[in-house]
Amino acid sequence: MAAALIGAAVLVVVLADPSSDATRPSPAPAEDVADLPASPEPAFTVAKPVELTVSRAVSHWATVLEDTPVRERPDAAAAVIMRLSTRTPEDTTNIVLILERQEGEDGRLWVHVRLPILPNDRTGWVPRSALGVYGALATHLVVDVNQFTATLFRGGRRIFRAPVGVGQRQWPTPTGKFYIRNKLVSYQSPFYGPLAFGTSARSSVLTDWPAGGFVGIHGTSEPQLLPGRISHGCVRMRNEDILRLGRLMPVGTPLTIQ
Amino acid sequence: MTSSGKGPEMKHGEELTLETLDQDGAIRETLDAMPSDSRRDFLRKSAGIGLLGVLAVPSAAEAATPKGDVAILNYALTLEYLQAAFYTETQRVGAVRGRLARVPTQVGAVERAHVSAIRKVLGSKSVKRPSFNFQGVTEDANKFLKTAVAFEDLAVAAYKSQAARIKSPAVLAAAIAIHSVEARHAAWMRYLVGINPAANAFDEGKPINEVQRIVKSTRFIVSSPRKTAKGKPRFTG
């Protein structure tokens, strides 16, 4: 006990005496936070977040994940309009334009989509589970069959306009609301020019045309005929214009032919 | 449209796991005890599930980042892609309304900023953005919120487990700066759902193989659609 008291007394003296060696700072500077090296600068910083403004000009498309019946209403018992397949005749992934969503009476989510069938402008319902990737786009192509123009808008702003050729009177370019289904490149066909877009629009006259009579938007080997009613229903434009459109217009873009 | 201004009804303290998102029973284990960290090479593993693109010639700035750190940043980038796409799609779809509507807008902006920053530092070494099929969770407020909790918890655990592996102090400083933001998001989402935002006194990380397994089991990452072909057109002409 006595030894402990003596020891405690010595400790008190040492702590109280500023000249004591025991009270001097440790020689190891790392033990003193003030002597630590400066923190490293981050390798990168993150810019101020920019919130997305959802515009009415934005449309949505979806891939078809599995072959599925399209129904008149969001109900598994509703009449079947057609069957959607996962591939297009051009062997690209089949996509549909989304119009709205609704929970069906069966509790499942159903999606109202625009269809690539005759008569044009048809729509129907598919279960969400039959669709895959969603895409969002702010572009919209408008083809005017009387003014012979194709105009591309992005976010409501015009970013492209070109003169076009459209269907002759006996093979009219169908009017209505459609969408761009795919893009074909690197083929050898001067008649179609260097690039062609496939659309969901179909000729109501050339129904026996190979692959179903789908209307395309493509280049031409006869630019001198533009603009005018010159085609079998497709929208033709100069090769330099279709190449520029190819850089500006993504697949899935809504198409209005008026 | 499915919509709700309320969060999912959950009992206070109820543990939320990725099993709430289970698709066909694919997700069996989620927020359970973490195993020890994996030493497997992330580049090799990720390439196996198609998340990584071909690495191109690096710029001077990219070359300054140690190889292992590049792999970790690409790992982080993949998770940031996933989160950014999830919140952005939710906002665009517009099915989350009421008091929750601000969540995808605000958090989505942050996740997109993370993507931009990491892509900038990685340059040509950045992995390509995958395609996503969120299978309806962006179109239902309850599913959205549960997925958000799971994603944020997963991101926090993923960043944490890599911190000790980062060689460059500068990269570590940046990663930590993002990690704490993800932790704030996680706490926010948990609060909205009604579960304890900070239930533990000590958070553990989640190793790469575990994170990859969970992400893969959601089947949210899918192959990109083929929108361009080379065949001769057969349009009406």
Image (cartoon, coloured by chain):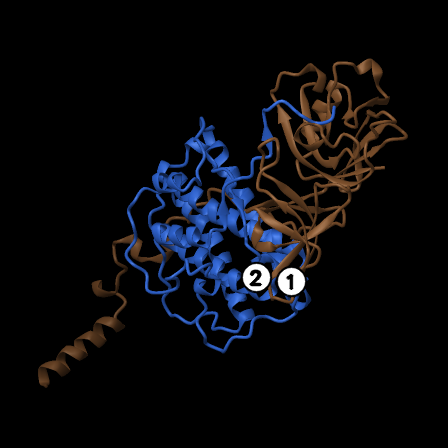
Chain colours: A brown, B blue
Q: Find disc 2 in the rendering and name its residue.
A: B144
Q: What residue type is labelled 2?
A: Phe
User: Would you call the spot at circle 1 few (<14 residues within 10 Å), some (14-19), or many (20 or more)?
Assistant: many
Q: Which amino acid does label 1 sit on?
A: Val
Q: Note whether A100 is above or below A182 in the view shown.
A: below
* Residue B102 image offset from top left, x and y in percent: 65, 61
Q: Find disc 1 in the rendering and name its residue.
A: B96
The residues bearing labels 1 and 2 have C-alpha atoms spaced at a distance of 8 Å
Q: Can residue A36 be seen in this view?
A: no
Task: Work out whether residue A254 or residue A166 is closer to the camera in this orientation and state it.
Answer: A166
Q: Mark 2 lies on which chain?
A: B
> Dividing the image into 4 quarters, which one contains the N terminus of chain B?
bottom right
Name which of mark 1 and mark 2 comes first in the sequence: 1
* Residue A18 image offset from top left, x and y in percent: 28, 67
Q: Are marks 1 and 2 in contact (CB under 8 Å)?
A: yes
Task: Work out whether residue A113 or residue B84 is closer to the camera in this orientation and state it.
Answer: A113
Furthest residue toward right = A146
